[in-house]
Amino acid sequence: MTELIDAPASTEKSPRSYEVKTYGCQMNVHDSERLSGLLDDAGYVPADTDDQADVIVFNTCAVRENADNRLYGNLGQLAHVKERNPDFQIAVGGCMAQKDRDTIVKKAPWVDVVFGTHNMGSLPALLERARHNQEAQVEILESLDVFPSTLPSRRESQHSGWVSISVGRMQQFLHVLHRSQPARQGEGPQARRHLGRG
């Protein structure tokens, strides 16, 4: 007689899966590679295409036409998923999150995390804090926490990738660049102010 022995119950949880949805410009594609790398480093795994991810991250753009309608439409479709599965998490980041801040959670209270363009490195910690505290985490920084190129990355292609050449408002960069240039002959401080360059 053969005795069946039950396998010990696994105490390990399977890693949480994620999906990053990118809206907008090419810079968002680059940022989404960074977000995926961060989640990989934190122990998350990319979701299979047929399965519902445990975490969905929307990387948004505020410039593209109808970006807000597209985001809120997708968030609305996920409300019933969140209702059925409270462990399912939704994060919204990028330019629109930076701009709209608390508005996102007011319009879609089932969103777990809202983060800005300057602190995408905080995403794994914000997801964990939202899960632990059972409330939305909104964190928007006005200046860079960590330079994005230092964050881990998950690239779709082994042969190409996006590169940051600037971060922040170009106006500040040009202002600093101009200040470092010597004045042209006959151009004093008054001329610079008049030309809008001082």
Image (tube, grey):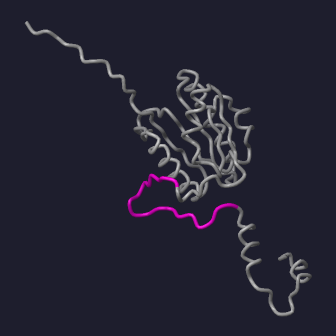
Asked whether 85 or 125 is in front, the reply is 125
**Residue 162: % across, % down:** 51, 62
Instruction: Give, as a single range, the part of the protein colored magenta.
Output: 151-168
Image quadrant assignment for residue 158: bottom left
Main secondary structure type of the part rendered in magenta: loop
Q: Quadrant of the C terminus?
A: bottom right
Residue at the spot 70% in from the left edge and 48% down from the top edge: 141
- In this view, the residue farthest toward the left is 1
For this view, does 100 lie left or right of residue 186? left
Image quadrant assignment for residue 143: bottom right
Q: Is residue 127 above or below residue 59?
A: above
Asked whether 180 or 197 is in front, the reply is 180
**Residue 114: % across, % down:** 65, 40
Residue at the spot 86% in from the left edge and 75% down from the top edge: 196
**Residue 64: % across, % down:** 67, 53
Image quadrant assignment for residue 104: top right
**Residue 107: % across, % down:** 72, 33
Residue at the spot 49% in from the left edge and 32% down from the top edge: 54
Q: Quadrant of the N terminus?
A: top left
Asked whether 71 or 191 is in front, the reply is 191
- In this view, the residue farthest toward the bottom is 185
Q: Is residue 23 above or below residue 52?
A: below
